[in-house]
Image (cartoon, rainbow, N blue to C red):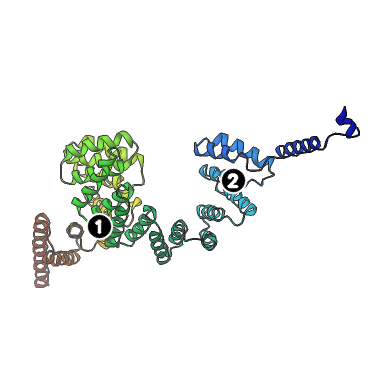
Amino acid sequence: MANNTLNNGGVPHHSANRRSERSIDKSKKDIPAIENRNWLLHRHYTRHEYKISKYLIDQELTNSNGHNEYASYLKGLILRREGKIQVSLDCFQNCYNINSANVDNVKQIAKSLFLLGSHKRAVDAYLEAGRMSTAPDWEIHHSLGECYVKLNLSEDAKREFKRSTELTKNEIPYLSLARLYVEENRVNDAIEVYSTALKGSCESEDAAIELGLVYLRVGDDQQAFQQFGTVLAHTASCTAAIVPMAYIIQMHQEYDVALSKYKTAAQILPESYHLWNNIGMCLYGKQKVVAAISCLKRAHYLNPMALLPACNLGRVLLTTGQPASAAIYLCAAVTAAPKNPQPYLLLGIALKKLEDLEGSEKALSKAHSLTPQDPLTLINYAVILEDRGKRDRANEILSDLKDIAAVTTVESQILETARSLSQRLLTNARITEDKRLLNEDEV
């Protein structure tokens, strides 16, 4: 009562201060920050719980009227994973409108433009991101290189990939640069880049496998086998290394060992036409023709437009005396690879067996135009020309074959056939000449 009297019945000053502070604290708690649940969004996103992430993100965007940058950013990433590139681009553009100083927003816009096929616009966006970045960013240079590859600007692409390799030890730019060298048939440069990538990351499976494939391409089976073996030492179930290693073994005619490896790979890749094609040819090497045809037909079924299963199936059917069936698959091989001479050669042989000499000549003529110095093509072309009565042209082809045999090694069977054909052409020429002189005497 005394205190109340002293204060004329009013509230004490210190009590009023405490009440005002409590009211201020309460008002602060009633106005939450826009980003107060970003931690929860991040947790669900990193756990790949995308369904609940999208639900929470939509809630946050609704509560913030679309001004939550992080929520919009995560939504763009999730939508891109779902293949909704254009919608994800809208999300990243919203992020840029909220915070135009964030370089990550610009990089994601550029990546979406790249995926949409707008490569020139993507280049402009990545260049803008590079100007905004406070330090050189290897990812920006690498992405620029990928854009230039799509635009067929290989020199600009190589420049950006090289710049990216100078900024990081990550294998990604090294692999992109090496693949570009492989496409340009600069094998030595590609091998050097792959080797550098392996020095920086000795456990890189992709670099080791691709380097092994390059060695396999140039015929260095030992180095290729070593690279594939290194990968399998770390990951025994890596089919990308098992299949080419088994192929090398198969080429050395160790068919049982190769088949055991193919069996392991088939448990992981049961729908691979490459795998079934190799299994078929391995069985063919073991003279198991029926099983080989079955496997090759499966490979052709899995990819009817692939060259190897159709071509190999035609070859095997030819050896089993089924030229009509072989011709069907060889026509499919020609359609799959119209610039590959092998299907034309085999098709010409199949048509000759079917007594379609005109079609055989056309097929072998095409094969000859694609590989004018292949001895097997030359001898078959000369044979069909002789059968068609075009002896002068056949002599020209045999002359070309003789010139090639003088500088390279040619199989003895081809040379023997060429000698026999040459003698037959000479004999026929003499008979024709004798008939011509006899006709003149009679006249």
Q: State the residue at coordinates (32%, 41%).
A: 273
Task: Say the numbered circle drawn on residue 411.
Answer: none
Q: Which picture quadrant has residue 106? A: bottom right
Q: Position of residue 86 (x, y in %)?
A: 57, 49
> Going 63% across and 50% down the picture, which residue do you hit?
94
Observer able to see residue 200: yes
Mark whose residue sits in front, 2 or 1: 2
Q: Position of residue 7 (x, y in %)?
A: 88, 35
Image coords of residue 46 (percent x, y): 50, 39
Residue type highlighted by circle 1? Leu
Pick whichever of labels 2 and 1 is earlier in the sequence.
Answer: 2
| Quadrant of image for the C terminus | bottom left
The crowd level at tag 2 (other Cα within 10 Å; few <14, some 14-19, many 20+) is some
Q: Amino acid at mark 2?
A: Tyr
Residue 61, image x and y in percent? Answer: 65, 42
Q: Is residue 244 visible?
A: no
Q: Quadrant of residue 402?
A: bottom left
Instruction: Name the quarter where the N terminus is drawn.
Output: top right
For the residue pair 306 and 173, the one nearer the viewer reads as: 173
Mark 1 lies on a secondary structure that is: helix
Label 2 sits on residue? 70
Alpha carbons under labels 2 and 1: distance apart: 65 Å
Q: Secondary structure at mark 2?
A: helix
Residue 364, numbered circle: 1
Q: Residue at x 26, y 51 (%)?
A: 212
> Could you tell whether 25 is left or right of 9 in the image?
left
Instruction: Classify mark 1: residues with Cα within 10 Å, few (<14), some (14-19) or many (20+).
Output: many
The answer to whether residue 254 is above or below residue 122 is: above
- The one nearer the camera, 132 or 315, is 132
